[in-house]
Image (cartoon, rainbow, N blue to C red):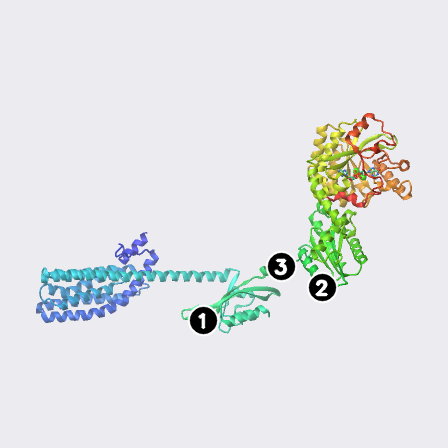
Amino acid sequence: MGETITLQRLLGMQKKVWNFKINADHETTELVAREQLKSFGQISRIGALIALPLTVYAMVLLFSYAEVGFIATACFYVAISAFVSVRNFLRQAALDPDTADYKVAIKNIHTESIISSIAFSCVLAIPFAFGQIPYNLDIAILAMGALVVGGFVFGSVPRAQTYNLSITTICYAGAFIAAKGYGGISTAILLIFFALCIDYIYRMFFFNFVQRHLHAAKQKDAAETVRLLLHDYAEQSSDWLWEVNGDHLIVNPSARFATAVDMEISELRDLPLVDLFEDSMERNQLAQSLASGKAFRDIHVPIKLGGEECWWRLSGRRIKTADGESSHIRGVAADITSAKKAEARVAHLAHFDSLTDLPNRALFNQSLQRSIGRMKNDQKLAVLYLDLDHFKTINDTLGHGAGDLVLKAVANRLENNIGIEDVVARLGGDEFAISLRNVGSYEDVMQVAANIIDKISEPVMVEGQPVATGVSIGIAVAPDCGNDGEELIKHADIALYNAKENGRGCASLFERSMHEAVQDRRNIEMDLRAALKRNELELYYQPLVNIETNETIGYEALLRWHHSEKGLIMPDVFIPVAEDTGLIVQLGEWVVRSALYEVAKWPEHLSVAVNLSPAQMRSPNLIPTIINALAATGVAPHRLELEITESVLMNDNQSNVELLHKIRSLGVRIALDDFGTGYSSLNYLRSFPFDKIKIDRCFVEEVDSREDCRAIIRAVTGLASSLGMVTTAEGVERSDQLSQLKEEGCVQVQGYLFSKAMPAANVEGRVETASASAAGAEASEIGEQKSTKSKRCKTPRKAQQRKAG
Ligand code: C2E
Ligand code: CA
Ligand code: CA
């Protein structure tokens, strides 16, 4: 605010006169003041020139009319004031407006205006007032002239102008009144009116003058800012400026530009700009744009820097100068290599899998559709849908790093085992697809699939450890199974489902009937979610019998599902679905609680065995569920036996082993179920001290007819007893088997020979009569619809089902 007042005072505009008001800070005040000085310096000389004829004319008038004494006084007086004025004017003109003390200089102009206006007015006004010169038109013209010229000379310094106008007007108006009495009043008023008009006009001029200079100052400021910014831009930003002359040779290369191309500034100077870039379409485009002289934006040009393929983005336009456009072109360049690379990467990712670098589903679909389009009439094309077996277990037990390594290894093996015309893709997760072009017969396709299964089944080495892998394959062949890419993939997927159902590690060809099977499974999945809430699940119990005494020592709890529409559903059908969907965790907790609730009603010597899926092992709820159920029912922990399969111990799963130890430390017993159906069976006996081994039904099946089965059972019972474990033979259906098992040293038996699984109520009845016969004739009547011949041996898959999860 203070600054503004200074300015206005200095400029003579501290009051809002004639509506012209100016606000400016200290800097602009100085700027305007210096402009005033400059302008005054120029005008004052012209003003002096104009004042001269007026003065001469006034002298002529004096000489014509006035008395000699008066003339002599006037001449003397004029000489002195003219001398002072002229000296002042000259001094003012000699001032350097840019360096002078502008405050002093402006004040001098104020003084000057007072002196000169008194001098020039009085020389005529006084003789006139005293009647020395008669009243005539010349006087009026001279008075007007003095006003106009004074206004003109001091117009750029309003306060000086005000002094000048006031003094001149007062002098002449006074003179008119003195000379003519009342008659002079009207003339005096007219004069004052003119003076006011002149004041208004010159103040308006001055106001515009200031505005113009303020505007110019602002523009200069802006230009300076832009210049600084450009400088900053060139020196610091990731982009840099370039400039070429009319021949498109580089001029004024900046240090940054030179650094960017790793050249000396001197080398860059006068080099054709386009020569910096690699010969390419883009470079031609740049050359054309330069030649056209039109502004261009974002041309991407390849450039080799330090042996590396890089990309620059250039924009440019002709430089504008005061007299139009110059032939020079100036622009910015930016290194966009990383953006380009990212772009290429994104484009690649849109079609390729980032982990294995195999084509992804989208690209596979495209290429499949193309291949189908090119197929000739007699040709066949096969789509193989692959899913790794146990991959989830690998991921869960060994970590995602190991999982990734396995996926990469599998991708490698697949690529190495297909023809050059064939395409292998990763569809996501552990699913892959292969399209085989121009296959001969179905046998050929099955042969390729078998070969792939072999190759994938070789263990993958992860950090020096072999990790077991396997693959299931579903196959759909065009044109028989469809003529559309998507349809083929869908059918191959359905066939894959079938392959998994058949025990994994195998290939299945699509058949129309598979559709239904898939649909059934989907329905089961949906219904199973509701089954628990609707109380449709029930535990059946199958007795475990002491081979020596024929006494029932406990029961294995086996799940049954009473479906509202489909009737009784066996666990082989729904447990795998429950495992795949994760429902098994919830289901398994229910089983533990229900089984313990039941066993609590039985005599102390009877125990219960509960099957555990590997997915349950991963649930943090497992141990709390067991502890709570034991506490709630008051059942002694040793009466609970958990049956797990080998898959839980696969790949040296240390966390599962630890968990088993924890469970065992509660007093709960652990049994190894389905022994003999997995992989390197005997090894697992050493990784955890099981309480019991359950020998799978497939060995028991032929124990009475095949020596090798007997040998295996003998080996297992021998090893088990030396390790302090109990052996239970599963699936004993005939007494011949029983006697053979007794001979081979089995401790316990379980099977239809004694009883099928039965509802809890039957167990209670049995317990009460407590007279189970070794023949178990009555029990086989009970509740079990399952056929004895239904399954001979647990397939490896069944063993894995309980691990898959
Ligand atoms: P598993 O644990 O091996 O159970 C033994 C299976 O063999 C039972 O089939 C039983 O009914 C059947 N079996 C018993 N004796 C004989 C016989 O003399 N001959 C023949 N042919 N079969 C006999 P089930 O009840 O159908 O259970 C099938 C599988 O379902 C079980 O095999 C187990 O792996 C799974 N499972 C059953 N209940 C549960 C459960 O509560 N949780 C989990 N995770 N799995 C369960
Ligand atoms: Ca079992
Ligand atoms: Ca079993």
Seen in the picture, residue 239 relative to 771 is either above or below; the reply is below
Q: Quadrant of residue 6?
A: bottom left
Can residue 614 be seen in the rendering of this structure?
yes
**Residue nearer the viewer, 201 or 252:** 201
Seen in the picture, residue 655 relative to 191 is either above or below; the reply is above
**Residue nearer the viewer, 504 or 73:** 504
Residue type for callout 1: Ser
Give the Cα distance between marks 1 and 3.
42 Å
Give the Cα distance between marks 2 and 3.
26 Å
Residue type for callout 3: Ala
Query: Residue 116's spot in the image, x, y percent?
Result: 20, 64
Position of 281 compared to 387: left or right? left
**Residue nearer the viewer, 771 or 154:** 771
Give the Cα distance between marks 2 and 1.
59 Å
Ligand 2, by image quadrant, is top right
Extreme residue toward the front, this view: 565
Position of 469 compared to 91: left or right? right
- State the residue position of label 2: 374
Q: Earlier in the sequence, mark 2 or mark 3?
A: 3
Q: Quadrant of residue 59?
A: bottom left
Q: Nearer the viewer, mark 2 or mark 1?
A: 2
Q: Residue at x 58, y 64 (%)?
A: 311
Q: Residues within 10 Å of mark 1 (few under 14, many from 20)?
A: few
- State the residue position of label 3: 347
Seen in the picture, residue 527 relative to 420 is either above or below; the reply is above
Seen in the picture, residue 150 relative to 748 is either above or below; the reply is below
Q: Which mark is residue 326?
A: 1
Q: Nearer the viewer, mark 2 or mark 3?
A: 2
